[in-house]
Image (cartoon, rainbow, N blue to C red):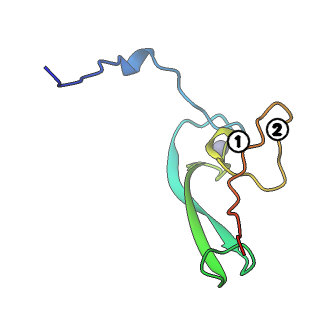
Amino acid sequence: MNKQQINVDISKADDITCENCGNYTFQEVALMKRLSPLISPTGKEAVVPIPTFACNACGHINKRFLPITPGIQEADEQPMEPRLKLEK
Ligand SMILES: [Zn+2]
């Protein structure tokens, strides 16, 4: 009864292709974010890996795969603040 199965016909789903070269295979990569001691919860510099996907052919990362994009701000996007609050 509570077995929830969602039947999705993958063949009807849209392919996501590389915005740069049109290739349609991707590999998992990681963005590395450096937290400065000022914003790090531990008060020490920290490196945080953010998993995402890069084009298998050219290495391009589609914008939609970037949850946090430094320097690129979409005008129509909600300014979600992934920032950690430092409370003193
Ligand atoms: Zn590509």
- Name the residue carrying label 1: 63
**Residue found at the very far front of the displayed protein:** 88
Mark 2 Cα shell of 10 Å, populated few (<14), some (14-19), many (≥20): few
Q: Is residue 5 above or below residue 85?
A: above
- Residue at x 72%, y 50% (from the top left corner): 81
- Residue at x 62%, y 78% (from the top left corner): 46
How far is mark 1 from mark 2, CA to CA? 10 Å
The kind of residue tagged 2 is Glu
The kind of residue tagged 1 is Lys
Q: Respond yes or no on whether mark 1 lies under 8 Å from ligand 1.
A: no
Camera-side mark, 1 or 2: 2
Q: Which image quarter: residue 43?
A: bottom right
- Residues under numbered marks 1 and 2 in contact, where contact means CB atoms less than 8 Å apart: yes
Q: Which image quarter: residue 73?
A: top right
Residues 29 and 42: in front is 42
Determine the secondary structure under disc 1.
Answer: helix
Q: Quadrant of the N terminus?
A: top left
Give the image location of residue 35, x and y in percent: 69, 73
- Name the residue carrying label 2: 74
**Residue found at the very far left of the displayed protein:** 1
Disc sitting over residue 16 in the figure? none
Give the image location of residue 23, x and y in percent: 59, 37
- Residue at x 35%, y 16% (from the top left corner): 9
